[in-house]
Image (cartoon, rainbow, N blue to C red):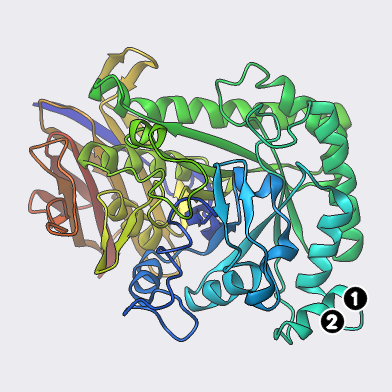
Amino acid sequence: MKKAEIIVDRHFLIGDVDKRIFGSFIEHLGRAVYEGIYQPGSPFADTDGMRTDVLELVRELQVPVVRYPGGNFVSGYHWEDGVGPKDLRPARPDPAWQVIETNAFGLNEFVTWAQKADTEVMMAVNLGTRGPEDAKNLLEYCNFESGTYYSDLRKKHGYEKPHHIKLWCLGNEMDGPWQIGHKTAVEYGRTAEETGRMMKMLDPSIETVACGSSNLEMPTFGSWEETVLNLCYDQVDYLSLHQYYGNANGDTADFLASSVGMDQFISSVISICDCVKAKKRTNKQINLSFDEWNVWYHSNDADAKLPKWSKAPHQLEDIYNFEDALLVGSMLITLLRHADRVKIACLAQLVNVIAPIMTSDTGAWRQTIFYPFFYTSRYGRGTVMNTIVEAPVYESRTYGDASYLDSVLIWNQENDELTLFAVNKSLEEDLEISCDLRQFTEYRIVDHKILTHENLKAVNTEDHPLEVTPVSGQNAALDSGKLTALFPKHSWQMIRMCKK
């Protein structure tokens, strides 16, 4: 049996968790909107056509912010197509995903849905085929009280009060050659600068997110970030990161080591942001928005066979298995370990499209990845402690040395609560862990959840929705301030401790 030690000190802290780190993403893609969050005529639909069963599951996750409407979709989107009387809205071809967008659902419907889901809107503007002027008009429509053309147009559309959207993405993946209207770093940096400047002149209270590289493998990674920030540093508040991971080669050990790559990615982007900060001799700090992250690879073959120009096809519908849930748990731990700089993150996406929630005409259910997100979102709020993990390592094919144990400890001082999240990546052995918590007197274990399964490929389906689900743990103890636990092989864990 392997052994590991988790070391923390109440005086050595990473930083407070911004709740927006538990954000998500809805794009006009596949069945994320249509048949996902919105399905008029469904027995689950409310009077606005919103799926109430989906709303219930989203509220369970306590998602504080949801990015909309894309994604690749936004780079060719005219937001005006999706507002006003529905019978006057045009259907348009969407070149990004080669489907037909009906525009039956748009900005105002999404704001209504977000209110019902107890979440805020993270709005993306089109900087592919459009630019600063259109972004300014959209902001006016959303945030101005009244007395201007676009604010009065919103009122005419039935929305008397402003939407007060405070978080804005300046385009999406503008470095990618697949992106409609993609740009060089200089072209995008100047566009982002002018867009951010015009938008903040209109509403100084908003925050803006500039596009970083579309993924770590982009040949321009690093130089893109530096060039863009050199141009728009003063007009933006966050820089985005996007990264997806997969196990197409069937190498589970290497797949589970992907959190090492994610950690290195975040550290690299922080370094670039701080390099530009030093060169500019400024006190302003750019933080990170990891606004697309997840496992994505299961649906690739099926998507290649989809007919073009259909409406809301079954697209990017990854059916997640148990090992995917392990990596999602590790990625959440990684995000938390960088909570001093990662202030926003969006699990991509939320419903049906590479998502923790799936729907059919007869119901909605939780995929395997739902559970680590659910527990981390609910109990991963507070202050991240500098969590040092002393554990055996293994050699992964892609990422080099990877620890068998990923872990982070969250201290919620307001509630006198400590929460440990951990993943044992060993495929063969249980892991015995210890942690000295004598600085936290009079604490006791109040909850221990374990997510594990003998079959790494086990999935949840509508017929068998509870095949992979957490169970209560029995092998953890907190005695005289010393925490000990036995983590089963390939398992995710949460141990909550509260003051007596």
Which image quadrant is residue 246 in?
Answer: top left
What residue type is disc 1 on? Tyr
Q: Dot 1 corresponds to which residue?
A: 149
Tag 1 near tag 2, CB within 8 Å = yes
**In the image, 231: left or right of 347?**
right
Crowding at mark 1 (Cα within 10 Å: few <14, some 14-19, many 20+): few
Would you say residue 479 is visible in this rendering?
Answer: no
Quarter of the image where the C terminus is located = bottom left
**In the image, 85: left or right of 241?**
right
State the image coordinates of residue 373 (x, y, percent, origin top left): 35, 53
Q: Marks 1 and 2, how far apart in space?
A: 5 Å
Of 435 and 343, nearer the camera is 343
Q: Is residue 448 above or below residue 484?
A: below
**In the image, 425: left or right of 382?**
left
State the image coordinates of residue 45 (x, y, percent, origin top left): 39, 79
State the image coordinates of residue 340 (x, y, percent, origin top left): 58, 45
Q: Is residue 433 above or below residue 3?
A: below
Of 204 and 475, nearer the camera is 204
Crowding at mark 2 (Cα within 10 Å: few <14, some 14-19, many 20+): some
Quarter of the image where the N terminus is located = top left
Would you say residue 268 is visible in this rendering?
Answer: yes
State the image coordinates of residue 66 (x, y, percent, origin top left): 54, 60
Disc 2 on helix, strand or loop?
Answer: helix
Q: Residue at x 50, y 82 (%)?
A: 48
Q: Residue at x 87, y 31 (%)?
A: 280
Q: Is residue 298 above or below residue 89?
A: above
What residue type is disc 2 on? Asp
Residue 179, numbered label: none
Q: Dot 2 corresponds to which residue?
A: 152
